[in-house]
Image (cartoon, rainbow, N blue to C red):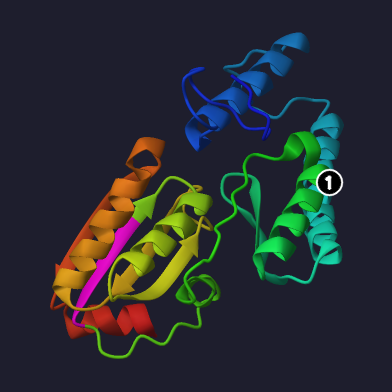
Amino acid sequence: YNTDTGGFRHTLEDAASNSMATDQALYAIAAYRYCQKGLSIWDFKSPSDTSSYRISAGSTVYTAEASADAVLKAANVELLTATPTCPGKYVIIICGAVGAVKSAMESGRQTAGIYLVGHHTINNVHASVPEAIVGTSEVGHIASIGVIETMTALTAVEAGDYAAKAANVRLMEIRIARGLGGKGFVILTGEVSAVRSAVKAAMNQLEETGDITSSSVIASPHPGLIDKLTN
């Protein structure tokens, strides 16, 4: 079922669109277009008239970049990232005052139009979230590590915000979908009890979305692992 955000949901009872339903719907639409052209949906070779597909892909990238431009021109916001991600999507993340962000988001949604997969605004986001997204977090001593894996980039940001607000932890990184098949993950640190509380809080808040795939807490991580995560 299509939603007013441009994404899809599995049932009418679902409150909002989700990434799995949206991906499935887009695959179904692509298969239908193949059938319209008399092509087999099981033929994975490129069709002979690839020009139409290239134009479509180019238009999507153009729309994504135009949306990023519209967002920045609409209000006084900071662009944290605007980049293609797996599988064939484009993520734009901004931060700023609540009113400015909402105004910029509306402009971006209008520019994206039917190409918009989903969107979300986090009010009063935790101060450590932007740093974790751009990779400038200063974490200090690492007593334990918590990891939350998500189905989407958007959910990874939400999970990081929930975790940071729930306990005395520090976000090390929020990884956004690149090279991850469209998934995301959050890495955080702190005392083991605080990390467990933070991970549990994020899991509880996002359980109903179906976008959390796994989580883990590592007490007293090996120095070799710490070195890889911090360098």
* Overall secondary structure of the magenta section: strand
Residue 87: x %, y % from top left: 57, 44
Q: In which quarter of the image is residue 81?
A: bottom right
Query: Quick check: can you spot residue 179?
Result: yes
> Between residues 213 and 75, which one lies in front from this camera angle?
75
Judge whether residue 44 can be spotted in this image. no
What is the x, y in percent for residue 54?
A: 81, 38
Q: Where in the figure is residue 16, as x and y percent of width and height?
A: 53, 32
Residue at label 1?
Answer: 111
| Residue 77 among magenta residues | no
- Mark 1 residue type: Thr
Residue displayed at 51% across by 37% down:
19
Q: In which quarter of the image is the C terminus?
A: bottom left
> Which span is picked out in magenta?
143-148
Pick whichever, 167 or 25, lies toward us: 167
Figure check: 223 above or below 129: below
The residue under the point 38% across, 60% down is: 162
